[in-house]
């Protein structure tokens, strides 16, 4: 009876879409006479649509964001900023409206385990800025870059626990990774032309440089990036997808198509030549094998260790005396074990941030750090003196500090001290525990896939932040907070003992 009634009550397609006709006419008129008004009108329509369909917003961003630079590349510079930052603005606006709707209007706010931690982190951030005399605008700009996609966590967390939606999200991430892998392999085979197609452009509006081309453009080796502008972004993204794809293989079905996808992603991961991505993928996937107690888990661990030991002892077929002449991806990996590379990292690279910058800050400003933005250049218009002005007082080399922004743990601690860094890391320890609990108690295959993949994923993220800062990069940050939202959502479902009511739609 209910089904019949629902069918009879459905409006004809024309009646349900009647609003589109005046909207199209109005858009055409505005586009003719005022391009800026067209943008505002389109933004309003998109906001209204995605406010009503937040699940579609999540899926859209998962699919769109990896290809964003390709879309933005065809736009004029004057539209680059609005188009690039519109989605961040929409997410924060939605989060604000959700808080207004659920708190100020006395409607129940769906509390999460990290609410207090997020609040403490934000307070610590601005308190650090106040203590260190950092301008409020600079503090806001810095924290915006760090938590720009935390709104997606709350959007996902406040949705209904729909397994079909979860499945679409996971397989969207995997599908995008396969597409990126095909592009990357194509770049490796074809060469410079396909690399240039997907290379981002310089964007200058007035005196403000919004973005640069890939800084690796002039390096002596070719690193292939898909559409993600830098090799480590591609490598990290492929690592994320690989963790979930391995979980799909173990929990949903050992299908040959999954093996083909795994092979494609591994090949592209190799071509990316991102060493931190290689290492994090190996450790993240290894964690999955040990969590499920796979019978070959020790075999998986021993073979790569033997390979690394062999490389560390030296290989007469690998030349490292002049990488500009004898470069290959294997040479680049082997170079990690050379004295030259160790000295380079220690004194002018990421190791400097961990071995010199962090201890200096620990002895001078351990609780609140040096303040937001310290040693973290955000855009080309921010003068070096504004970012590195405290380096001389601490007797640190300015040039060596340019890698601080690529070391997540160092960047957090230097900016906001022990309190802020501890609270931020504690959030993800909670998410890891949620994933373990969900894996144990919710037996549905797609939820098991989420939980198992997330455990490897969180391990990989923890490793990656030794040589990158995922949360400062759009694609990686979006995936991290989306996964956290799903884990918190389905963990909450278990705790309320309503796992049987998960939507099957």
Image (cartoon, rainbow, N blue to C red):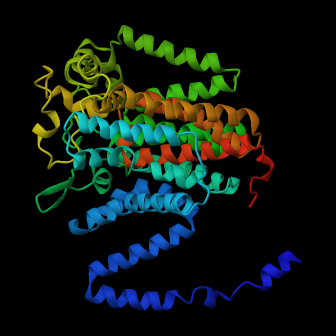
Q: Is residue 285 above or below residue 443?
A: above
**Which residue is nearer to you in this view: 54 or 124?**
124
Residue placed at 23% from the left, 45% from the top?
Answer: 378
Residue 257 coordinates in the image, percent (x, y):
64, 46
Residue placed at 74% from the left, 44% from the top?
Answer: 496
Q: Quadrant of the C terminus?
A: bottom right
Residue 162 coordinates in the image, percent (x, y):
69, 55
Considering every residue shown, the one lying at the far top of the view is: 313
Q: Quadrant of residue 75?
A: bottom left
The number of discs equals 0
Q: Is residue 91 above or below residue 12?
A: above
**Which residue is nearer to you in this view: 374 or 111?**
111
Q: Quadrant of residue 401?
A: top left
Res 268 seen here: no
Considering every residue shown, the one lying at the far right of the view is: 1
Q: Quadrant of the N terminus?
A: bottom right
Res 383 seen here: yes
Residue 406 coordinates in the image, percent (x, y):
30, 33
Q: Quadrant of residue 440?
A: top right
Residue 167 coordinates in the image, percent (x, y):
65, 52
Residue 90 as seen in the image, left or right of residue 196: right
Residue placed at 43% from the left, 27% from the top?
Answer: 422
């Amino acid at each position: 009876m209910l089904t019949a009634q629902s069918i009879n009550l459905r409006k004809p397609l024309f009646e349900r879409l009647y609003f589109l006709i005046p909207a199209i006419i109005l858009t055409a008129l505005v586009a003719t006479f005022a391009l800026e008004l067209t943008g505002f009108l389109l933004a309003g329509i998109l906001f209204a649509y995605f406010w009503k369909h937040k699940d579609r917003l999540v899926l859209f961003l998962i699919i769109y964001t990896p290809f964003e630079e390709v879309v933005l590349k065809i736009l004029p510079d004057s539209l680059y900023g609005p188009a690039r930052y519109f989605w961040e603005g929409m997410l924060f606006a939605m989060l604000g409206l959700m808080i207004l709707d659920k708190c100020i209007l006395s409607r129940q706010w769906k509390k999460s385990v990290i609410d207090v931690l997020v609040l403490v982190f934000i307070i610590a951030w601005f308190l650090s800025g106040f203590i260190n005399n950092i301008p409020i605008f600079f503090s806001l700009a810095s924290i915006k870059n760090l938590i720009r996609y935390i709104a997606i966590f709350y959007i996902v967390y406040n949705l209904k626990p729909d397994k079909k939606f979860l499945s679409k999200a996971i397989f969207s991430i995997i599908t995008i990774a396969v597409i990126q892998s095909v592009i990357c392999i194509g770049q490796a085979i074809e060469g410079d032309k396909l690399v240039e197609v997907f290379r981002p452009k310089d964007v200058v509006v007035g005196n403000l440089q919004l973005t640069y081309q890939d800084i690796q453009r002039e390096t002596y080796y070719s690193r292939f990036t898909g559409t993600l502008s830098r090799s480590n972004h591609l490598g990290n993204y492929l690592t994320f997808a690989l963790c979930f794809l391995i979980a799909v293989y173990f929990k949903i079905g050992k299908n040959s198509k999954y093996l083909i996808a795994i092979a494609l992603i591994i090949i592209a991961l190799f071509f990316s030549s991102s060493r931190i991505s290689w290492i994090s993928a190996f450790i993240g996937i290894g964690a999955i094998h040990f969590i499920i107690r796979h019978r070959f888990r020790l075999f998986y661990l021993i073979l790569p260790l033997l390979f690394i030991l062999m490389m560390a002892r030296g290989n007469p077929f690998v030349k490292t005396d002049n990488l500009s002449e004898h470069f290959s991806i294997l040479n680049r990996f082997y170079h990690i074990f050379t004295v030259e590379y160790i000295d380079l990292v220690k004194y002018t690279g990421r190791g400097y941030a961990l071995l010199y910058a962090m201890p200096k800050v620990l002895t001078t400003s351990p609780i609140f750090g040096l303040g937001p933005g310290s040693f973290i250049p955000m855009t080309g218009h921010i003068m070096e003196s504004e970012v590195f002005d405290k380096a001389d007082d601490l007797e640190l080399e300015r040039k060596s500090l340019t890698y601080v922004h690529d070391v997540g743990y160092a960047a957090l601690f230097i900016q906001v001290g022990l309190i802020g860094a501890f609270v931020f890391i504690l959030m993800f320890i909670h998410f890891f525990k949620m994933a373990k609990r969900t894996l144990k108690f919710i037996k549905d295959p797609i939820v098991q896939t989420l939980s198992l993949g997330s455990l490897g994923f969180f391990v990989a993220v923890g490793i990656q932040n030794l040589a990158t800062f995922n949360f400062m990069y759009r694609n990686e940050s979006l995936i991290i907070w989306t996964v956290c939202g799903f884990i918190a959502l389905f963990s909450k479902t278990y705790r309320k003992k309503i796992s049987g009511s998960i939507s099957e739609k």
